[in-house]
Image (cartoon, grey):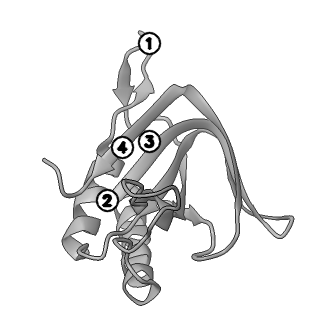
Amino acid sequence: MLAVVQRVSEAKVEIDGQIKAEIDQGFLILLGIHQTDSEEDCQYLASKISGLRIFSDNDGKMNLDIQAIQGRIILVSQFTLYAQTRKGNRPSFIEAARPEQAIPLYELLIQLLEEKLGFPIQTGTFGADMQVCLTNDGPVTIILDSKSS
């Protein structure tokens, strides 16, 4: 499971011209689910994301987690993170989990994050054509891979 965690000062997701999710300071997370992913991958990412200290303290050091700054999260499923581009110019997505596997894992990660953080996680809509707008603060972007140590 791959999570691209972007520290944002603002972010929103629009679907068909309607705002589906919108936050000020926090994380915009793009989530890729691999066909070999399981509940263990969700547990790992929920723990990492909830404890990730990438917000600045009073000394300007990245030392604060999302709860310390009272931030919020938008989580967007993005199967294209598992694009295979080695051969040819058209990406292949065969390693990305199919919806029947990916949706329950996506929903589990949302639930685990809500339990750990104590606030609702905003989302896009799985499989929808979305417009994602953000102001990356820093810029700070961290890639979490549940398969690497």
In percent of the image, x 39 and y 58: which residue is there?
A: 87
Among the two numbered marks 2 and 3 on one chain, the one whose residue lies closer to the N terminus: 2
Comparing labels 1 and 4, the label whose residue is closer to the camera: 4
In percent of the image, x 49 and y 55: which residue is there?
A: 30
Comparing labels 4 and 2, the label whose residue is closer to the camera: 4
Residue 144 x %, y %: 31, 48
Among the two numbered marks 4 and 2 on one chain, the one whose residue lies closer to the N terminus: 2
Measure how far apart labels 2 and 3 are at the Cα level.
12 Å
Instruction: Return the residue found at the far right.
Output: 17
Q: Which residue is mark 1?
A: 60
Residue 63 x %, y %: 34, 25
Quadrant where the N terminus is found in the figure: bottom left
Among the two numbered marks 2 and 1 on one chain, the one whose residue lies closer to the N terminus: 2
Measure how far apart labels 1 and 3 are at the Cα level.
15 Å
Instruction: Return the residue found at the far left.
Output: 149
Q: Which residue is mark 3?
A: 66
Marks 4/3 in contact by CB < 8 Å: the verdict is: no
Q: Quadrant of residue 21?
A: bottom right
Circle 3: residue type:
Ile
Task: Say few, some or many: other residues with alpha carbon within 10 Å of mark 3 (under 14 / 14 to 19 / 20 or more).
Answer: many
Q: Which residue is mark 2?
A: 46
Marks 4/2 in contact by CB < 8 Å: the verdict is: no
Q: Quadrant of residue 137?
A: top right
In percent of the image, x 29 and y 57: which residue is there?
A: 45
Tell me, yes or no, if residue 121 can be seen here.
no
Circle 2: residue type:
Ala
Q: Which residue is mark 4?
A: 143
